């Protein structure tokens, strides 16, 4: 049976985890935590939403040199149990569909597809992706129902950096640290406090590689056509197995 590269599943890179949970410390500025909580509360209130991301991640070579890679993703989510995303990476193009029962991936560039039985809700799907599929994409405890709890756990510091303009959007920039990663997030001001950029720096690697995401084209009430979350196997596609993409290194195991 053919196998599909781990990049096929890496489209989930717009939705997962930033670090291990340990006791929260008082060193995080309450103002920064309040802004973060306002964002997660707002995100948690959205039943359906879509977004586009432009992503850059660094691979550290054996020589110590860092090489950057880029890809774009578009994601549509309907709570509690629907997700459809597309990843564009040069000539590569992958589609991932989660319908509440199955997680399916189609790699258009090679006409391959794979599927696996998945949990029946988005929260458990994300944990399943991490714990079972060995997929730890940096970015979105934002979509989990306990997002604030996860994002604020383990912080050793946090503060408000100040105002910034990202893609024409006025934002407040926050910076946080944990024992494993440093991360920054830019959150839109106004009545829709959505994330528009974040940067994650790995602390436990001497080279300190980074992951950077620019998030745009937010739609908090997208029109979802009938059958949008159904995965229909293309007539010519060959079934394949899952092999998983290492987001931290860009490598295939």
Image (cartoon, rainbow, N blue to C red):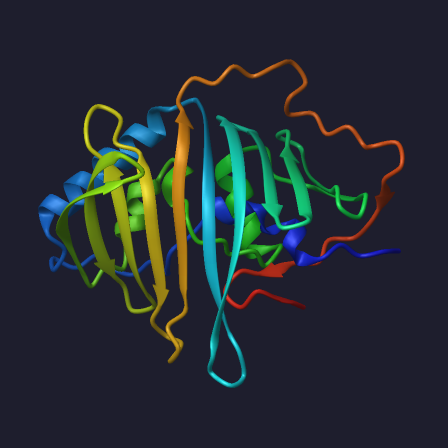
Seen as rendered, the residue at the extreme bottom is 63
Residue at position x 20%, y 50% in the image: 174
**83 sits left or right of 208 in the view:** right
Residue at position x 27%, y 54% in the image: 184
Q: Between 207 and 239, which is closer to the camera in this rendering?
A: 207
**What is the x, y in percent for residue 207?**
39, 77
The tally of labels here is 0
Residue 153: quadrant of the picture: bottom left
Res. 150 in view? no
**Quadrant where the image shows the C terminus:** bottom right
Asked if residue 134 is positioned above or below residue 13 in the image, the reply reads below
Res. 55 in view? yes
Asked if residue 78 is positioned above or below residue 58 in the image, the reply reads above
**What is the x, y in percent for residue 12?**
55, 46
Asked if residue 94 is positioned above or below residue 252 in the image, the reply reads above
Residue 140: quadrant of the picture: top left
Q: Between 16 and 251, which is closer to the camera in this rendering?
A: 251
**Quadrant where the image shows the N terminus:** bottom right
**What is the x, y in percent for residue 11?**
58, 46
Q: Between 121 and 88, which is closer to the camera in this rendering?
A: 88
**What is the x, y in percent for residue 146?**
35, 40
Residue at position x 85%, y 56% in the image: 2
Residue at position x 17%, y 45% in the image: 33
């Amino acid at each position: 049976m053919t196998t599909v590269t781990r990049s096929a599943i890496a489209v989930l890179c717009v939705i997962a985890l930033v670090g291990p949970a340990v006791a929260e410390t008082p060193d995080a500025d309450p103002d920064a935590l309040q802004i973060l909580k306002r964002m997660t509360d707002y995100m948690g209130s959205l039943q359906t939403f879509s977004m586009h991301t432009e992503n850059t991640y660094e691979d550290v070579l054996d020589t110590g040199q860092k090489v950057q890679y880029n890809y774009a993703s578009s994601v549509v989510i309907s709570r509690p149990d629907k997700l459809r995303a597309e990843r564009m990476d040069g000539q590569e193009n992958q589609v991932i569909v989660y319908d509440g029962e199955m997680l399916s991936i189609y790699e258009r560039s090679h006409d391959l597809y794979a599927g696996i039985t998945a949990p029946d809700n988005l929260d458990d799907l994300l944990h399943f992706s991490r714990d079972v599929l060995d997929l730890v994409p940096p970015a979105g405890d934002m979509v989990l129902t306990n997002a604030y709890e996860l994002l604020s756990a383990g912080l050793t510091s946090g503060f408000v950096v100040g105002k910034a303009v990202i893609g024409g959007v006025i934002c407040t920039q926050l910076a946080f640290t944990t024992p494993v990663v440093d991360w920054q997030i830019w959150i839109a001001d106004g009545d829709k406090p959505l994330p528009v950029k974040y940067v994650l720096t790995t602390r436990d690697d001497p080279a300190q590689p980074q992951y950077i995401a620019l998030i745009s084209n937010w739609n908090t009430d997208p029109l979802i056509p009938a059958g949008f979350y159904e995965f229909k196997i293309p007539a010519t596609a060959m079934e394949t197995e899952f092999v998983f993409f290492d987001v931290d290194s860009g490598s295939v195991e």
